[in-house]
Amino acid sequence: MPRQSRRTLAPLTRGRFMKEKLTTLSDAVRRIPSGSRVAFGGNIMRRQPNAAVREMIRQGIGDLTVYAFATGLSVDMLAAAGLLRRYEGVYVGLFWHGLAPNFRRAVEAGRVEVRDFSESSIVARFQAACSGLSYMPVKALLGTDMMRQDPDIVMETACPFTGEPYAAVRAIDAEFTVMHGYRGDRFGNIQWPLARDADDVDQIIARGSRRLIVTVEEIVDHEEIVRQPNLTYIPAQWVEAVALAPFGAHPLACDTIHDEDVDHIRAYAQAGATPEGARAYLDAYVHGGPTHDDYLMRFGGRDALEARLSVRRSGA
């Protein structure tokens, strides 16, 4: 490339022509109206967007349809608050801490609809969305009761070349996607650490999103992003809003940054054993303060949580 042309590209790499996406958590969540279809990132014990969900509860955003891979506390809190209408995914639970008590109660009472999928078939639905397809063929559901649960989202089809049977699973059609990440810049470039645990399907979910909201453990200068561009797993052009929310997955883990808060997850499960206990929990930890910082202060603040739970300071 001629030297002059290289210089003309330099301002772009510094973010000069990129739109700033950094906002507050409350402003980011306020974009989601009641009745929305929302996809969540994260996994059972890791990186669920719990700070954003607590803000959704504070704002009373309800009548929600939620799509996720395998999830738990985030969806359970929405069920406890009476804001969940439908869930489509693999699993909702607290892993080795037991079932998701509020979600289970709501499903048994008929207040929440559920559509079950295997891991590979829900990933196929997200892959269809990020590929711009209306459906994806899979085999995992053939011969199971999942084939009969909802003809609007799963049905049998045949390969046009061989006639071989497949299950056609409809693409995820989320109006919003909410996830928690590691670090980002003010433009919405989101990076993961070089050393990390399994990556789940957050990148696939993000790529297929229409309006993506990401909370992160830290905001760094754009120059930090440019220095290691290979760590960017969600580029700015996918993101509508990015908000700073350290310990945004708490009490769950953000791998390589902090571990799960085992004591608090146990306390949450115990509180959720009864509707009264669940309401008391929401009053104390969600409605007890208007901001995420107020939530963190319930545990002594960010420094106290870092001292107790951190694996290491955030960084690439």
Image: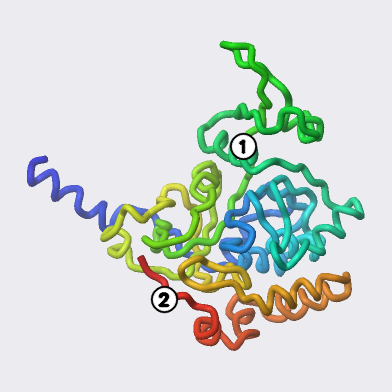
Q: In which quarter of the image is the N terminus?
A: top left
Q: Between 230 and 142, which is closer to the camera in this rendering?
A: 142
Q: Which mark, by number, is residue 125?
A: 1
Residue plotted at (26% across, 52% down): 12
Residue plotted at (37% across, 69% down): 315
Q: In this view, does 210 lie to the left or right of 236?
A: right
* Distance between the alpha carbons at the discs numbered 1 and 2: 35 Å
Q: Between 204 and 3, which is closer to the camera in this rendering?
A: 204
Q: Where is residue 235 in the image (x, y as percent from the top left)?
A: 40, 50
Q: Where is residue 125 in the image (x, y as percent from the top left)?
A: 61, 37
Q: Quadrant of the C terminus?
A: bottom left
- Tag 1: amino acid: Arg
Q: Where is residue 199 in the image (x, y as percent from the top left)?
A: 49, 53
Q: Mark 2 points at which residue?
A: 313
243 lies above or below 212: below
- Tag 2: amino acid: Arg
Q: Is residue 231 left or right of residue 201?
A: left
Q: Is residue 231 left or right of residue 102?
A: left
Q: Which of marks 1 and 2 is nearer the N terminus?
A: 1
Q: Between 62 and 248, which is closer to the camera in this rendering?
A: 248
**Residue sticking out furthest to the right:** 109
- Quick one: label 1, few (<14), some, or many (20+) residues within 10 Å? many
289 lies above or below 95: below
Q: Is mark 1 on a helix, strand or loop?
A: helix
Residue plotted at (71% across, 41% down): 117
